[in-house]
Image: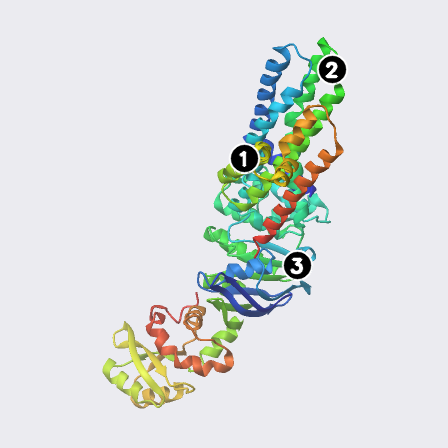
Amino acid sequence: MIEVKNLSKAYGAKKALESLSFTASDGEILGFLGPNGAGKSTTMNILTGYLSSDQGEVRLNGIDILSDPVRAKKEIGYLPEHPPLYPDMTVDEYLGFIYDLKKVKLPKREHLHGIRALVKVDDVRGRVIRNLSKGYQQRVGFAGALVGDPKILILDEPTVGLDPKQIIEIRALIKKLGQNRTVVLSSHILPEIQAVCDKIVIINKGKLVADGAADTLAAGLSKEHDVVVQIEGEIDHVRKLLSAVAGVKKVTDGKNLAKNVTEYDVETAPGTDVRRGIFAAMSENNCPILMMRTKELTLEEIFLRVTAGERFDTAAAEEADQSQSANNENGGADLDGNTKA
Amino acid sequence: MTAILKRELLTYFHSPIGYVFAAVSVLTSGFFFLMFCLGYGSADISSVFAMMFFVLMVFVPLLTMRLFSEEQKLGTDRLLLTSPVNLGGLVLGKFFAALIVFALSTLVLPFYGVMLSIFTEVNWASVWGNYVGLLLLGAVYIAIGMLVSSLTENQMIAAVGGFFLNLVTFILTPLSDAVSDSSLPLGFLANALKYLSVYDRFTEFTLGIFDFANILFFISFAAVFLFLTVRSVDGRRW
Protein backbone atom coordinates (compact mmCIF):
# COMPACT_ATOMS: atom_id res chain seq x y z
CA MET A 1 0.00 0.00 0.00
CA ILE A 2 1.40 3.36 -1.02
CA GLU A 3 -0.17 6.61 0.11
CA VAL A 4 1.08 9.85 -1.34
CA LYS A 5 -0.38 13.09 -0.06
CA ASN A 6 0.25 16.61 -1.37
CA LEU A 7 3.76 15.92 -2.52
CA SER A 8 5.66 18.99 -3.70
CA LYS A 9 9.23 19.36 -4.79
CA ALA A 10 11.09 22.21 -6.42
CA TYR A 11 14.56 22.32 -7.91
CA GLY A 12 15.48 25.91 -7.33
CA ALA A 13 12.79 27.97 -9.03
CA LYS A 14 11.53 25.07 -11.13
CA LYS A 15 8.60 23.24 -9.62
CA ALA A 16 9.07 19.54 -10.32
CA LEU A 17 6.01 18.37 -8.39
CA GLU A 18 3.01 20.28 -7.20
CA SER A 19 0.68 18.86 -4.60
CA LEU A 20 0.64 15.34 -6.02
CA SER A 21 -1.61 12.81 -4.27
CA PHE A 22 -2.49 9.22 -5.13
CA THR A 23 -2.74 5.81 -3.55
CA ALA A 24 -1.93 2.31 -4.70
CA SER A 25 -3.43 -0.64 -2.87
CA ASP A 26 -2.08 -4.11 -2.24
CA GLY A 27 -2.28 -6.35 -5.27
CA GLU A 28 -2.57 -3.34 -7.54
CA ILE A 29 -0.27 -2.37 -10.38
CA LEU A 30 -0.27 1.36 -10.74
CA GLY A 31 0.89 2.82 -14.02
CA PHE A 32 2.64 6.10 -13.68
CA LEU A 33 2.40 7.89 -16.93
CA GLY A 34 3.61 11.21 -18.21
CA PRO A 35 5.68 12.80 -20.92
CA ASN A 36 9.42 13.12 -20.43
CA GLY A 37 10.19 15.64 -17.71
CA ALA A 38 6.73 15.38 -16.16
CA GLY A 39 8.12 14.44 -12.75
CA LYS A 40 7.83 10.65 -12.88
CA SER A 41 11.37 9.91 -11.79
CA THR A 42 11.30 12.64 -9.17
CA THR A 43 8.18 11.08 -7.67
CA MET A 44 9.76 7.65 -7.65
CA ASN A 45 12.92 8.99 -6.06
CA ILE A 46 10.83 10.55 -3.32
CA LEU A 47 8.79 7.37 -2.83
CA THR A 48 11.98 5.43 -2.29
CA GLY A 49 13.60 7.95 0.03
CA TYR A 50 16.38 8.86 -2.41
CA LEU A 51 15.13 12.43 -2.55
CA SER A 52 13.28 14.40 0.06
CA SER A 53 10.11 16.23 -0.74
CA ASP A 54 9.64 19.88 0.15
CA GLN A 55 6.12 19.20 1.32
CA GLY A 56 3.77 16.29 1.65
CA GLU A 57 3.77 12.81 2.99
CA VAL A 58 4.67 9.36 1.68
CA ARG A 59 3.58 6.26 3.57
CA LEU A 60 4.71 2.81 2.50
CA ASN A 61 2.54 0.11 4.08
CA GLY A 62 1.66 2.71 6.71
CA ILE A 63 5.26 3.67 7.51
CA ASP A 64 6.30 7.25 6.91
CA ILE A 65 9.42 7.41 4.72
CA LEU A 66 10.70 10.53 6.47
CA SER A 67 10.16 9.65 10.11
CA ASP A 68 11.20 5.99 9.87
CA PRO A 69 13.23 5.67 6.67
CA VAL A 70 15.09 2.45 7.52
CA ARG A 71 11.90 0.51 8.27
CA ALA A 72 10.05 2.04 5.30
CA LYS A 73 12.90 1.15 2.93
CA LYS A 74 12.65 -2.49 4.02
CA GLU A 75 9.26 -2.55 2.32
CA ILE A 76 10.48 -1.51 -1.10
CA GLY A 77 12.35 -2.89 -4.06
CA TYR A 78 13.42 -0.14 -6.43
CA LEU A 79 14.58 -0.40 -10.00
CA PRO A 80 15.66 3.06 -11.16
CA GLU A 81 15.67 4.04 -14.82
CA HIS A 82 19.36 3.14 -15.05
CA PRO A 83 19.81 -0.05 -13.06
CA PRO A 84 22.24 0.55 -10.18
CA LEU A 85 24.81 -2.09 -11.10
CA TYR A 86 28.42 -2.50 -10.06
CA PRO A 87 30.13 -3.43 -13.34
CA ASP A 88 33.08 -5.07 -11.61
CA MET A 89 30.96 -7.63 -9.75
CA THR A 90 29.59 -10.92 -10.97
CA VAL A 91 25.82 -11.40 -10.92
CA ASP A 92 26.15 -13.68 -7.90
CA GLU A 93 28.35 -11.23 -6.03
CA TYR A 94 25.97 -8.40 -6.82
CA LEU A 95 22.85 -10.17 -5.63
CA GLY A 96 24.72 -11.45 -2.57
CA PHE A 97 25.79 -7.90 -1.79
CA ILE A 98 22.22 -6.61 -1.96
CA TYR A 99 21.10 -9.52 0.20
CA ASP A 100 23.65 -8.52 2.86
CA LEU A 101 22.96 -4.82 2.41
CA LYS A 102 19.24 -5.26 3.02
CA LYS A 103 19.94 -7.65 5.91
CA VAL A 104 17.49 -10.16 4.48
CA LYS A 105 16.45 -12.95 6.81
CA LEU A 106 15.34 -15.49 4.17
CA PRO A 107 17.59 -18.50 3.45
CA LYS A 108 20.23 -16.98 1.16
CA ARG A 109 20.90 -19.74 -1.36
CA GLU A 110 17.28 -20.62 -2.01
CA HIS A 111 16.09 -17.03 -2.07
CA LEU A 112 18.71 -15.82 -4.54
CA HIS A 113 18.33 -18.92 -6.67
CA GLY A 114 14.56 -18.31 -6.82
CA ILE A 115 15.08 -14.73 -7.97
CA ARG A 116 17.66 -15.68 -10.59
CA ALA A 117 15.30 -18.29 -11.98
CA LEU A 118 12.36 -15.85 -11.94
CA VAL A 119 14.11 -13.15 -13.97
CA LYS A 120 16.09 -15.69 -15.97
CA VAL A 121 19.63 -14.69 -15.15
CA ASP A 122 20.71 -18.04 -13.74
CA ASP A 123 22.76 -18.82 -16.84
CA VAL A 124 24.93 -15.72 -16.38
CA ARG A 125 25.29 -15.93 -12.59
CA GLY A 126 29.07 -16.25 -12.70
CA ARG A 127 29.65 -13.55 -15.27
CA VAL A 128 30.93 -10.06 -14.60
CA ILE A 129 28.11 -7.55 -15.01
CA ARG A 130 30.22 -5.28 -17.23
CA ASN A 131 30.27 -7.99 -19.91
CA LEU A 132 26.53 -8.62 -19.99
CA SER A 133 24.22 -7.31 -22.69
CA LYS A 134 21.90 -4.40 -21.94
CA GLY A 135 18.94 -6.76 -21.67
CA TYR A 136 20.69 -8.96 -19.14
CA GLN A 137 21.90 -5.95 -17.18
CA GLN A 138 18.34 -4.68 -16.97
CA ARG A 139 17.21 -8.07 -15.69
CA VAL A 140 20.01 -8.21 -13.13
CA GLY A 141 18.81 -4.80 -11.93
CA PHE A 142 15.31 -6.21 -11.70
CA ALA A 143 16.62 -9.19 -9.75
CA GLY A 144 18.30 -6.77 -7.36
CA ALA A 145 14.98 -5.03 -6.72
CA LEU A 146 13.40 -8.38 -5.83
CA VAL A 147 15.98 -9.33 -3.20
CA GLY A 148 14.34 -9.50 0.21
CA ASP A 149 10.93 -10.15 -1.31
CA PRO A 150 9.71 -6.57 -0.82
CA LYS A 151 5.98 -5.96 -0.67
CA ILE A 152 6.24 -2.79 -2.73
CA LEU A 153 7.98 -2.68 -6.07
CA ILE A 154 8.87 0.60 -7.71
CA LEU A 155 9.96 0.18 -11.30
CA ASP A 156 11.11 3.13 -13.35
CA GLU A 157 10.82 2.23 -17.03
CA PRO A 158 11.69 -1.43 -16.46
CA THR A 159 11.58 -2.57 -20.08
CA VAL A 160 13.91 0.02 -21.58
CA GLY A 161 16.57 -1.61 -23.70
CA LEU A 162 14.96 -5.03 -23.84
CA ASP A 163 14.12 -6.88 -27.02
CA PRO A 164 10.44 -7.60 -27.77
CA LYS A 165 10.56 -11.13 -26.39
CA GLN A 166 12.16 -9.95 -23.17
CA ILE A 167 9.62 -7.14 -22.91
CA ILE A 168 6.79 -9.64 -23.03
CA GLU A 169 8.51 -11.79 -20.41
CA ILE A 170 9.13 -8.88 -18.08
CA ARG A 171 5.56 -7.63 -18.44
CA ALA A 172 4.25 -11.09 -17.62
CA LEU A 173 6.58 -11.18 -14.63
CA ILE A 174 5.38 -7.79 -13.40
CA LYS A 175 1.76 -8.94 -13.69
CA LYS A 176 2.58 -12.05 -11.72
CA LEU A 177 4.47 -10.13 -9.05
CA GLY A 178 1.66 -7.62 -8.85
CA GLN A 179 -0.81 -10.22 -7.66
CA ASN A 180 0.35 -10.02 -4.07
CA ARG A 181 2.37 -6.82 -4.05
CA THR A 182 1.91 -3.15 -4.69
CA VAL A 183 3.67 -2.24 -7.90
CA VAL A 184 4.29 1.22 -9.25
CA LEU A 185 5.44 1.17 -12.83
CA SER A 186 6.46 4.28 -14.67
CA SER A 187 6.61 4.52 -18.39
CA HIS A 188 6.04 6.84 -21.26
CA ILE A 189 5.16 3.84 -23.40
CA LEU A 190 1.38 3.70 -23.36
CA PRO A 191 0.78 0.14 -24.56
CA GLU A 192 3.00 -1.06 -21.77
CA ILE A 193 0.87 0.63 -19.15
CA GLN A 194 -2.29 -0.56 -20.84
CA ALA A 195 -1.02 -4.13 -20.98
CA VAL A 196 0.07 -4.35 -17.38
CA CYS A 197 -1.63 -1.84 -15.11
CA ASP A 198 -4.92 -1.89 -13.20
CA LYS A 199 -4.82 1.76 -12.37
CA ILE A 200 -3.29 4.75 -14.05
CA VAL A 201 -1.99 8.02 -12.74
CA ILE A 202 -1.12 10.56 -15.39
CA ILE A 203 1.02 13.51 -14.47
CA ASN A 204 2.11 16.44 -16.52
CA LYS A 205 4.44 19.25 -15.47
CA GLY A 206 4.45 17.89 -11.93
CA LYS A 207 0.70 17.93 -11.53
CA LEU A 208 -1.80 15.12 -11.45
CA VAL A 209 -4.01 15.33 -14.51
CA ALA A 210 -5.85 12.01 -14.41
CA ASP A 211 -6.23 9.22 -11.93
CA GLY A 212 -8.34 6.11 -12.25
CA ALA A 213 -8.76 2.68 -13.76
CA ALA A 214 -7.70 2.50 -17.41
CA ASP A 215 -11.23 1.58 -18.54
CA THR A 216 -12.87 4.32 -16.48
CA LEU A 217 -10.62 6.95 -17.96
CA ALA A 218 -11.53 5.85 -21.47
CA ALA A 219 -15.25 5.55 -20.75
CA GLY A 220 -15.39 8.96 -19.12
CA LEU A 221 -14.04 10.63 -22.19
CA SER A 222 -15.98 8.68 -24.81
CA LYS A 223 -19.46 9.77 -23.69
CA GLU A 224 -20.01 11.65 -26.87
CA HIS A 225 -20.39 8.42 -28.86
CA ASP A 226 -18.49 9.49 -31.90
CA VAL A 227 -19.05 6.71 -34.40
CA VAL A 228 -17.27 5.07 -37.27
CA VAL A 229 -19.50 3.63 -40.03
CA GLN A 230 -18.93 1.75 -43.25
CA ILE A 231 -21.74 2.44 -45.70
CA GLU A 232 -22.39 1.31 -49.24
CA GLY A 233 -23.51 4.15 -51.49
CA GLU A 234 -22.34 7.15 -53.44
CA ILE A 235 -20.03 9.23 -51.21
CA ASP A 236 -21.63 12.68 -51.61
CA HIS A 237 -25.10 11.28 -51.16
CA VAL A 238 -24.22 9.33 -48.03
CA ARG A 239 -22.36 12.29 -46.58
CA LYS A 240 -25.38 14.51 -47.08
CA LEU A 241 -27.62 11.95 -45.41
CA LEU A 242 -25.26 11.56 -42.46
CA SER A 243 -24.93 15.32 -42.00
CA ALA A 244 -28.69 15.63 -41.86
CA VAL A 245 -29.00 13.25 -38.90
CA ALA A 246 -29.80 15.12 -35.67
CA GLY A 247 -26.77 15.42 -33.43
CA VAL A 248 -24.12 15.01 -36.11
CA LYS A 249 -21.53 17.77 -36.05
CA LYS A 250 -19.11 16.75 -38.73
CA VAL A 251 -18.64 13.92 -41.20
CA THR A 252 -15.28 12.95 -42.58
CA ASP A 253 -14.98 10.31 -45.23
CA GLY A 254 -12.03 8.07 -44.81
CA LYS A 255 -10.84 4.94 -46.51
CA ASN A 256 -12.52 3.72 -49.65
CA LEU A 257 -12.89 0.08 -48.77
CA ALA A 258 -14.41 -1.39 -51.91
CA LYS A 259 -16.41 -0.23 -54.90
CA ASN A 260 -18.91 2.21 -53.46
CA VAL A 261 -18.10 1.29 -49.86
CA THR A 262 -16.56 4.01 -47.74
CA GLU A 263 -15.72 4.43 -44.08
CA TYR A 264 -16.93 7.64 -42.43
CA ASP A 265 -15.92 9.26 -39.15
CA VAL A 266 -18.96 10.88 -37.60
CA GLU A 267 -18.33 13.48 -34.94
CA THR A 268 -21.29 14.14 -32.69
CA ALA A 269 -22.50 16.84 -30.35
CA PRO A 270 -21.71 16.17 -26.69
CA GLY A 271 -24.11 13.84 -24.93
CA THR A 272 -25.94 12.66 -28.03
CA ASP A 273 -26.23 9.17 -29.44
CA VAL A 274 -26.66 9.29 -33.23
CA ARG A 275 -26.54 5.57 -33.95
CA ARG A 276 -30.30 5.05 -34.25
CA GLY A 277 -30.71 8.15 -36.42
CA ILE A 278 -28.00 6.97 -38.79
CA PHE A 279 -29.59 3.54 -39.01
CA ALA A 280 -33.00 5.00 -39.85
CA ALA A 281 -31.65 7.46 -42.45
CA MET A 282 -29.59 4.85 -44.26
CA SER A 283 -32.31 2.27 -44.23
CA GLU A 284 -34.85 4.75 -45.71
CA ASN A 285 -32.43 5.60 -48.52
CA ASN A 286 -31.36 2.06 -49.22
CA CYS A 287 -27.74 2.59 -48.28
CA PRO A 288 -26.72 -0.56 -46.39
CA ILE A 289 -24.62 -0.08 -43.24
CA LEU A 290 -21.89 -2.70 -43.37
CA MET A 291 -20.34 -1.80 -40.04
CA MET A 292 -20.97 0.71 -37.28
CA ARG A 293 -19.27 1.14 -33.94
CA THR A 294 -18.63 3.83 -31.35
CA LYS A 295 -15.21 5.27 -31.27
CA GLU A 296 -13.57 4.22 -28.04
CA LEU A 297 -10.68 6.28 -26.87
CA THR A 298 -7.36 4.55 -26.65
CA LEU A 299 -4.95 5.40 -23.93
CA GLU A 300 -3.00 7.45 -26.44
CA GLU A 301 -5.95 9.75 -26.94
CA ILE A 302 -6.66 10.09 -23.25
CA PHE A 303 -3.01 10.83 -22.71
CA LEU A 304 -2.92 13.49 -25.39
CA ARG A 305 -6.05 15.08 -24.03
CA VAL A 306 -5.06 15.20 -20.41
CA THR A 307 -1.51 16.29 -21.04
CA ALA A 308 -2.68 19.04 -23.35
CA GLY A 309 -3.30 21.08 -20.27
CA GLU A 310 -6.67 20.40 -18.74
CA ARG A 311 -7.33 18.56 -15.51
CA PHE A 312 -9.46 15.53 -16.18
CA ASP A 313 -11.83 13.69 -13.95
CA THR A 314 -14.81 11.60 -14.86
CA ALA A 315 -17.34 14.10 -13.57
CA ALA A 316 -15.85 16.84 -15.65
CA ALA A 317 -15.97 14.80 -18.82
CA GLU A 318 -18.23 17.35 -20.45
CA GLU A 319 -15.56 19.93 -20.08
CA ALA A 320 -13.04 17.63 -21.64
CA ASP A 321 -15.39 17.16 -24.56
CA GLN A 322 -15.22 20.83 -25.35
CA SER A 323 -11.50 20.74 -25.86
CA GLN A 324 -11.58 17.55 -27.86
CA SER A 325 -11.67 19.15 -31.25
CA ALA A 326 -8.68 21.32 -30.43
CA ASN A 327 -6.70 18.28 -29.37
CA ASN A 328 -7.63 16.34 -32.42
CA GLU A 329 -6.21 19.08 -34.54
CA ASN A 330 -3.04 19.00 -32.50
CA GLY A 331 -2.18 15.48 -33.40
CA GLY A 332 -5.09 13.34 -32.34
CA ALA A 333 -5.75 13.00 -36.04
CA ASP A 334 -2.55 10.98 -36.44
CA LEU A 335 -3.76 8.37 -34.07
CA ASP A 336 -5.84 5.51 -35.24
CA GLY A 337 -8.51 5.70 -32.64
CA ASN A 338 -9.78 2.25 -33.46
CA THR A 339 -6.66 0.35 -32.83
CA LYS A 340 -6.05 -1.00 -29.39
CA ALA A 341 -2.32 -0.86 -29.20
CA MET B 1 28.04 -1.74 7.46
CA THR B 2 29.71 -5.14 6.98
CA ALA B 3 28.08 -5.56 3.54
CA ILE B 4 29.53 -2.23 2.40
CA LEU B 5 32.90 -3.03 3.96
CA LYS B 6 33.06 -6.38 2.17
CA ARG B 7 32.05 -4.89 -1.15
CA GLU B 8 34.57 -2.06 -0.93
CA LEU B 9 37.39 -4.46 -0.04
CA LEU B 10 36.40 -6.61 -3.00
CA THR B 11 36.46 -3.57 -5.29
CA TYR B 12 39.89 -2.48 -4.09
CA PHE B 13 41.28 -5.80 -5.22
CA HIS B 14 39.11 -6.11 -8.34
CA SER B 15 40.53 -2.84 -9.59
CA PRO B 16 44.20 -1.86 -9.82
CA ILE B 17 43.82 0.88 -7.18
CA GLY B 18 44.46 -1.37 -4.17
CA TYR B 19 47.53 -2.92 -5.77
CA VAL B 20 48.88 0.40 -7.01
CA PHE B 21 48.58 1.90 -3.55
CA ALA B 22 50.25 -1.10 -1.92
CA ALA B 23 53.03 -1.02 -4.52
CA VAL B 24 53.64 2.71 -4.02
CA SER B 25 53.70 2.23 -0.28
CA VAL B 26 56.16 -0.67 -0.41
CA LEU B 27 58.41 0.89 -3.04
CA THR B 28 58.69 4.33 -1.48
CA SER B 29 59.11 3.09 2.07
CA GLY B 30 61.64 0.54 0.81
CA PHE B 31 63.56 3.35 -0.87
CA PHE B 32 63.58 5.46 2.30
CA PHE B 33 64.56 2.41 4.37
CA LEU B 34 67.43 1.75 2.01
CA MET B 35 68.53 5.38 2.13
CA PHE B 36 68.15 6.24 5.81
CA CYS B 37 68.68 2.93 7.58
CA LEU B 38 70.79 0.71 5.38
CA GLY B 39 72.67 3.58 3.72
CA TYR B 40 73.60 5.35 6.97
CA GLY B 41 73.75 2.18 9.03
CA SER B 42 71.09 3.55 11.39
CA ALA B 43 68.70 1.45 13.45
CA ASP B 44 66.22 4.32 13.80
CA ILE B 45 63.42 3.89 11.31
CA SER B 46 61.55 6.99 12.47
CA SER B 47 62.87 8.95 9.52
CA VAL B 48 61.28 6.43 7.15
CA PHE B 49 57.93 7.05 8.83
CA ALA B 50 58.52 10.80 8.74
CA MET B 51 59.05 10.69 4.99
CA MET B 52 55.95 8.55 4.52
CA PHE B 53 53.89 11.54 5.70
CA PHE B 54 54.45 13.21 2.34
CA VAL B 55 54.00 10.07 0.26
CA LEU B 56 50.68 9.30 1.91
CA MET B 57 49.57 12.90 1.60
CA VAL B 58 49.74 12.44 -2.17
CA PHE B 59 48.63 8.84 -2.55
CA VAL B 60 45.84 8.31 0.01
CA PRO B 61 43.44 10.39 -2.15
CA LEU B 62 43.89 7.62 -4.77
CA LEU B 63 42.32 5.21 -2.31
CA THR B 64 39.42 7.47 -1.44
CA MET B 65 38.64 9.24 -4.70
CA ARG B 66 36.19 6.65 -5.98
CA LEU B 67 34.40 5.89 -2.70
CA PHE B 68 31.44 8.17 -3.33
CA SER B 69 32.20 9.75 -6.72
CA GLU B 70 31.96 6.43 -8.50
CA GLU B 71 28.65 5.56 -6.81
CA GLN B 72 27.22 8.83 -8.07
CA LYS B 73 28.55 8.28 -11.54
CA LEU B 74 27.25 4.69 -11.80
CA GLY B 75 23.93 5.58 -10.17
CA THR B 76 24.55 2.93 -7.53
CA ASP B 77 24.09 5.55 -4.84
CA ARG B 78 20.39 5.01 -5.53
CA LEU B 79 20.76 1.42 -4.47
CA LEU B 80 22.63 2.32 -1.29
CA LEU B 81 20.43 5.24 -0.30
CA THR B 82 17.16 3.40 -0.92
CA SER B 83 18.30 0.34 1.02
CA PRO B 84 17.51 0.01 4.72
CA VAL B 85 20.97 1.15 5.82
CA ASN B 86 21.72 4.20 7.92
CA LEU B 87 24.14 6.70 6.47
CA GLY B 88 26.56 6.39 9.38
CA GLY B 89 26.95 2.68 8.67
CA LEU B 90 27.42 3.38 4.99
CA VAL B 91 30.17 5.95 5.58
CA LEU B 92 31.90 3.85 8.26
CA GLY B 93 31.83 0.76 6.03
CA LYS B 94 33.66 2.61 3.31
CA PHE B 95 36.02 4.25 5.79
CA PHE B 96 37.10 0.98 7.38
CA ALA B 97 37.52 -0.70 4.00
CA ALA B 98 39.93 2.04 2.93
CA LEU B 99 41.65 1.91 6.33
CA ILE B 100 42.14 -1.87 6.06
CA VAL B 101 43.72 -1.50 2.62
CA PHE B 102 45.85 1.30 4.02
CA ALA B 103 46.92 -0.78 7.02
CA LEU B 104 47.76 -3.80 4.86
CA SER B 105 49.74 -1.68 2.41
CA THR B 106 51.81 -0.05 5.14
CA LEU B 107 52.32 -3.23 7.14
CA VAL B 108 55.68 -3.47 5.46
CA LEU B 109 57.00 -0.65 7.67
CA PRO B 110 57.09 -2.58 10.96
CA PHE B 111 58.54 -5.41 8.90
CA TYR B 112 61.61 -3.22 8.29
CA GLY B 113 62.07 -3.35 12.06
CA VAL B 114 62.22 -7.12 11.81
CA MET B 115 64.89 -6.83 9.13
CA LEU B 116 66.93 -4.42 11.26
CA SER B 117 66.63 -6.68 14.29
CA ILE B 118 68.79 -9.23 12.45
CA PHE B 119 71.71 -6.80 12.58
CA THR B 120 71.11 -4.77 15.70
CA GLU B 121 68.96 -4.02 18.70
CA VAL B 122 65.64 -2.42 17.66
CA ASN B 123 63.51 -0.13 19.79
CA TRP B 124 60.19 -1.87 19.21
CA ALA B 125 58.18 0.66 21.21
CA SER B 126 59.29 3.31 18.75
CA VAL B 127 58.50 1.11 15.73
CA TRP B 128 54.96 0.31 16.87
CA GLY B 129 54.41 3.86 18.14
CA ASN B 130 55.33 5.11 14.68
CA TYR B 131 53.07 2.59 13.03
CA VAL B 132 50.11 3.60 15.22
CA GLY B 133 50.86 7.24 14.31
CA LEU B 134 50.90 6.29 10.65
CA LEU B 135 47.55 4.50 10.90
CA LEU B 136 46.02 7.51 12.62
CA LEU B 137 47.42 9.76 9.92
CA GLY B 138 45.91 7.41 7.33
CA ALA B 139 42.54 7.62 9.08
CA VAL B 140 42.66 11.42 8.88
CA TYR B 141 43.65 11.44 5.21
CA ILE B 142 40.99 8.87 4.36
CA ALA B 143 38.27 10.83 6.16
CA ILE B 144 39.31 13.98 4.32
CA GLY B 145 39.37 12.16 0.98
CA MET B 146 35.94 10.69 1.59
CA LEU B 147 34.40 14.07 2.24
CA VAL B 148 35.80 15.43 -1.02
CA SER B 149 34.68 12.30 -2.88
CA SER B 150 31.15 12.77 -1.58
CA LEU B 151 31.07 16.26 -3.06
CA THR B 152 31.76 15.39 -6.68
CA GLU B 153 31.09 12.65 -9.17
CA ASN B 154 34.40 13.27 -10.88
CA GLN B 155 37.09 11.02 -9.42
CA MET B 156 39.90 13.22 -10.67
CA ILE B 157 38.51 16.24 -8.86
CA ALA B 158 38.01 14.07 -5.77
CA ALA B 159 41.68 13.03 -5.84
CA VAL B 160 43.05 16.51 -6.45
CA GLY B 161 40.69 18.03 -3.87
CA GLY B 162 41.72 15.42 -1.30
CA PHE B 163 45.39 16.11 -1.97
CA PHE B 164 44.80 19.84 -1.63
CA LEU B 165 43.12 19.48 1.77
CA ASN B 166 45.88 17.13 2.94
CA LEU B 167 48.35 19.77 1.89
CA VAL B 168 46.47 22.33 3.97
CA THR B 169 46.82 20.13 7.07
CA PHE B 170 50.58 20.23 6.49
CA ILE B 171 50.81 23.92 5.62
CA LEU B 172 49.32 24.81 9.00
CA THR B 173 52.77 24.18 10.49
CA PRO B 174 54.84 26.65 8.41
CA LEU B 175 51.88 29.03 8.52
CA SER B 176 51.84 28.95 12.30
CA ASP B 177 55.63 29.54 12.33
CA ALA B 178 55.26 32.45 9.96
CA VAL B 179 52.54 34.01 12.06
CA SER B 180 54.46 33.69 15.30
CA ASP B 181 57.64 35.06 13.66
CA SER B 182 55.85 38.12 12.36
CA SER B 183 55.68 41.27 14.41
CA LEU B 184 51.89 41.18 14.45
CA PRO B 185 50.20 40.47 17.77
CA LEU B 186 48.67 37.20 16.55
CA GLY B 187 50.02 34.78 19.09
CA PHE B 188 46.63 33.19 19.64
CA LEU B 189 46.32 32.52 15.91
CA ALA B 190 49.76 30.94 15.78
CA ASN B 191 48.79 28.73 18.71
CA ALA B 192 45.50 27.76 17.14
CA LEU B 193 47.20 26.83 13.86
CA LYS B 194 49.84 24.88 15.72
CA TYR B 195 47.15 23.10 17.69
CA LEU B 196 45.44 21.98 14.48
CA SER B 197 48.65 21.01 12.70
CA VAL B 198 48.50 17.35 11.71
CA TYR B 199 52.17 17.41 10.74
CA ASP B 200 53.38 18.60 14.16
CA ARG B 201 51.40 15.95 15.94
CA PHE B 202 52.54 13.23 13.59
CA THR B 203 56.15 14.34 14.05
CA GLU B 204 55.76 13.74 17.77
CA PHE B 205 55.04 10.09 17.01
CA THR B 206 58.17 9.83 14.90
CA LEU B 207 60.18 11.43 17.73
CA GLY B 208 59.05 8.60 19.99
CA ILE B 209 56.50 10.65 21.94
CA PHE B 210 53.37 8.60 22.42
CA ASP B 211 50.88 11.18 23.67
CA PHE B 212 47.24 10.21 24.14
CA ALA B 213 46.20 13.77 23.44
CA ASN B 214 47.62 13.33 19.95
CA ILE B 215 45.82 10.03 19.48
CA LEU B 216 42.59 11.67 20.55
CA PHE B 217 43.28 14.57 18.20
CA PHE B 218 43.67 12.31 15.18
CA ILE B 219 40.58 10.29 16.04
CA SER B 220 38.50 13.44 16.56
CA PHE B 221 39.85 14.98 13.37
CA ALA B 222 38.83 11.92 11.36
CA ALA B 223 35.47 11.75 13.15
CA VAL B 224 34.68 15.36 12.22
CA PHE B 225 35.35 14.68 8.56
CA LEU B 226 33.34 11.45 8.64
CA PHE B 227 30.46 13.36 10.20
CA LEU B 228 30.73 16.01 7.49
CA THR B 229 30.70 13.21 4.90
CA VAL B 230 27.46 11.84 6.36
CA ARG B 231 25.97 15.35 6.20
CA SER B 232 27.18 15.80 2.65
CA VAL B 233 25.64 12.52 1.46
CA ASP B 234 22.42 13.28 3.30
CA GLY B 235 22.40 16.82 1.93
CA ARG B 236 22.17 15.57 -1.63
CA ARG B 237 18.62 14.43 -0.96
CA TRP B 238 17.45 18.03 -0.60
- The answer to whether residue A330 is seen in the rendering is yes
Give the amino acid type for the residue marked by disc 3 in the picture: Lys
* Residue at mark 2: chain: B
Q: Residue at x 67, y 18 (%)?
A: B45
Give the amino acid type for the residue marked by disc 1 in the picture: Phe
Tags 1 and 3 in contact by the CB under 8 Å rule? no
The secondary element bearing badge 1 is classed as helix
Asked whether the residues under marks 1 and 3 belong to the same chain, the reply is no
Which residue in the structure is indicated by mark 2? B122
Locate residue B208 relative to residue B29 in the image: left or right.
right
Give the amino acid type for the residue marked by disc 2 in the picture: Val
Asked whether the residues under marks 1 and 2 belong to the same chain, the reply is yes
> Foreground residue, B86 or A224?
B86
Q: Quadrant of the N terminus of chain B?
A: top right
Which residue in the structure is indicated by mark 1? B163
Residue mark closest to the camera, 1 vs 3: 1
Q: Residue at x 39, y 71 (%)?
A: A337
The image quadrant of residue A263 is bottom left
The image quadrant of residue A59 is bottom right
Locate residue B65 relative to residue A278 in the image: left or right.
right
Q: Compute the Cα span from label 1 to label 2.
A: 34 Å
* Residue at mark 3: chain: A
Locate residue A175 relative to residue A202 in the image: left or right.
right
> Foreground residue, A126 or A48?
A48
Q: Residue at x 44, y 78 (%)?
A: A222
